[in-house]
Amino acid sequence: MAKTYKNFIGGRWVAPTTGKYFENRNPADWREVIGRFPSSGKTDVQQAVRSAWRGFEVWRRTPAPQRGDILRRVGDLLAQRKEEIARAMTREMGKVLAETRGDVQEGIDTAYYAASEGRRLFGRTVPSELRDKWAMSTRRPVGVAGLITPFNFPMAIPTWKMFPALLCGNAVIFKPAQDVPLTGTLLVEALLDAGLPPEVVQLVHGSGSVAGSAIVEHPKVPVISFTGSTETGSRLGQTCGRMHKRLSLEMGGKNAMIVMDDADLDLALDGVLWGAFGTTGQRCTATSRLLLHRKVHDRFLRTLCDRVEQLRLGDGLLPTTEVGPLINEPALRKVEEYVEIGRKEGASLEVGGRRPGGAKLGNGWFYRPTVFAGVKAGSRLEQEEIFGPVLAVVRINSLDQAIRVNNGVRYGLSSSLYTGDVNGAFRAIEDIQAGITYVNAPTIGAEAHLPFGGVKETGNGHREGGWQVYDFYSETKTVYVDYSGRLQRAQIDTYE
């Protein structure tokens, strides 16, 4: 019998008021039930909001360096439990153990970085235009933040949102994706064990359409941070705009890697294999387009296809596995649909394009890493996010053309250029429309202390990670102290 898990609401582990649960299953072997988790409803969210505001009143009065000390202890606990969490994560979302260890490490790095920001929540002190008057600004928390996170980075993305929110003094309501509830539970356990006041964090499991919507639509949750599809983000934007909520969106990507004729081709080959097929292509930063210069196109494509055919699929817990399963059956069906779209558009299927054979993989959501060549700029295969192990190869004649093709999609998250030409590299950095550009590295690999996010329909102007995210989770308060003992009028034509 699989274990039944609970929400964490009101400082206690509690069953959902709905009495309903969903099963969390292993995508590498759908027969394995990892656990049963709450299908929470609106009442659960209402209880979480009331508790979070009680927690906020305690937490906001805790000095920021002390808040940082607790987050540092969270980082220590995640480091101690790294292997346990990584293995649990691989079981519930499928990516290989080396990647889930890296996912936990990202959470550790984010915790330590957030801890240091507890002594750097800087305001500004500036000269007043009037005598005997002090002028300054300070940072203060907003209140309660609702955090809605995806399946593909079950530890990294929640910590990108949660740790800065907590460091700034906010309470949080956390709803992880239904595909990865166990990792979310393990994260909350680490927070509590580190000494976070219990009502500062609420864990509400359930579907996005019910629990997630209830969080977004609750009038007492003034801050929402969401990572997911552009379509869902657009709907959230309408709701939050109408309700005057602060909203951070991290959405889709259709990232291109450009390989010029003067590139280190061995380095580029390693980069595209990792960028396109790491996490089975289920990254918003995944390399889903490869723009190959005509002079190296044929040779590079042949070598790439040879290497792709050798990639080993399997259970991510096995040391020989290089590519794990897709997260669930709908994700697998979507990949199959896009492979058929590619065929109909006239692209050449070079490798993959099918489910693997064999009994070992028959009970999981596996799909062979796939490469299409002869993909036309503007085609659906080249334009639309697939979120799976499908790479579209486009032949280009120049860097100018490559930049135009790179920019010709509605997304603008990550980008990559392999070249030995420093002048071309800096021109691409200037002209590529993306929040992130890598030179001589693939489109994936964000670091915790740098801003993460994109332009166009990838986001709404905010960033996660780095120093900018702390501005999102805090508000500026301007303070004037007049010790002149008389009325002084600012913003007049002449000084007195």
Image (tube, rainbow, N blue to C red):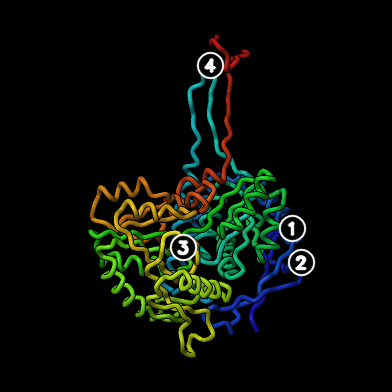
Query: Which label sits on residue 47?
Result: 1
Residue bearing mark 2: 17
**Horizontal and vertical percent position of residue 23:** 65, 76
Residue at 76% x, 68% y: name it. Answer: 18
Residue bearing mark 4: 130
**CB within 8 Å, label 2 to label 1:** yes
Helix or strand or loop: what does disc 2 sit on? loop
Most foreground residue, 242 or 201 = 242
Residue 479 placement, left or right of 379: right
Residue at 55% x, 9% y: name it. Answer: 496
Sequence order check, earlier mark of 4 and 3: 4
Most foreground residue, 38 or 446 = 446
Distance between mark 1 and mark 4 Cα atoms? 49 Å
Amino acid at dot 3: Ser
Residue 465 placement, left or right of 476: left
Quadrant of the image for the N terminus?
bottom right
Sequence order check, earlier mark of 3 and 1: 1
**Marks 3 and 2: which is nearer the front?**
3
Distance between mark 2 and mark 1 Cα atoms? 10 Å
Helix or strand or loop: what does disc 1 sit on? helix
Residue bearing mark 3: 379
User: Are there few (<14), some (14-19), or many (20+) residues within 10 Å of tag 2?
Assistant: some
Amino acid at dot 2: Thr
Distance between mark 3 and mark 1 Cα atoms? 48 Å
Helix or strand or loop: what does disc 4 sit on? loop
Distance between mark 3 and mark 2 Cα atoms? 47 Å
Q: Quadrant of residue 112?
A: bottom left
Residue 421 visible: yes
